[in-house]
């Protein structure tokens, strides 16, 4: 179960309203969208496809509290700003083509080749 509930405007679960509210006025919620209500299943489905939903699912798996949309957006914007700064810095330094900043250790690095000279020989070094 993903934590989705449908409640009426009066707070009762849809289909079980006890205050005479119209069941068609159901409000949909999701545990991955704290503080947010959805007026239709298509709105809820769109939420399930969002980065915010996926991020909160990962937080739930890690035992962390769900983020409100405004908090998620702030974190996302900060992360994107840091990425842009890093890419600009790498572009100025001419290191943008190197993975990991050019520190070596890739499959073609000298350090890696040194340890793989005897690859394919059983048990010899």
Image (tube, rainbow, N blue to C red):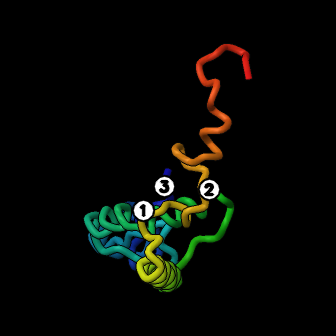
SS at mark 3 in the image: loop
* Front label number (1 vs 2): 2
Q: CA distance from mark 2 to mark 3?
A: 12 Å
Q: Counting residues from the N terminus, which is met first, the one under dot 2 or under dot 3? A: 3
SS at mark 2 in the image: helix
Mark 1: few/some/many CA within 10 Å (<14, 14-19, 20+): few
SS at mark 1 in the image: loop
Q: Is residue 40 left or right of residue 12?
A: left
Mark 3: few/some/many CA within 10 Å (<14, 14-19, 20+): few
Asked if labels 3 and 2 touch by Cβ distance under 8 angstroms, the answer is: no
Q: Counting residues from the N terminus, which is met first, the one under dot 1 or under dot 2? A: 1
Residue 17 visible, this angle = no
Residue 62 visible, this angle = yes
Query: Which one is nearer the viewer's eye here, 102 or 38?
Result: 102
Residue at 34% over, 62% down: 49
Q: Is residue 63 above or below residue 39?
A: above
Q: Which mark is residue 16?
A: 1
Q: Is residue 53 above or below residue 36?
A: above
Q: CA distance from mark 1 to mark 2?
A: 31 Å
Residue hosting label 2: 61
Residue at 42% over, 75% down: 19
Residue hosting label 3: 2
* Front label number (2 vs 3): 2
* Front label number (3 vs 1): 3
């Amino acid at each position: 179960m993903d934590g989705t509930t449908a409640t009426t405007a009066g707070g009762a679960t849809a289909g079980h309203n006890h205050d005479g509210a119209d069941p068609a006025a159901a409000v949909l919620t999701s545990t991955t969208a704290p503080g947010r209500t959805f007026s239709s299943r298509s709105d809820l489905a769109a939420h399930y496809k969002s980065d915010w939903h996926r991020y909160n699912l990962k937080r739930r798996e890690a035992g962390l509290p769900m983020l409100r949309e405004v908090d998620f957006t702030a974190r996302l914007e900060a992360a994107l700003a840091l990425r842009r700064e890093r890419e600009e810095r790498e572009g100025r330094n001419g290191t943008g083509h190197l993975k990991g900043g050019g520190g070596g250790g890739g499959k073609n690095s000298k350090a890696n080749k040194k340890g793989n000279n005897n690859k394919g020989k059983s048990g010899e070094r």
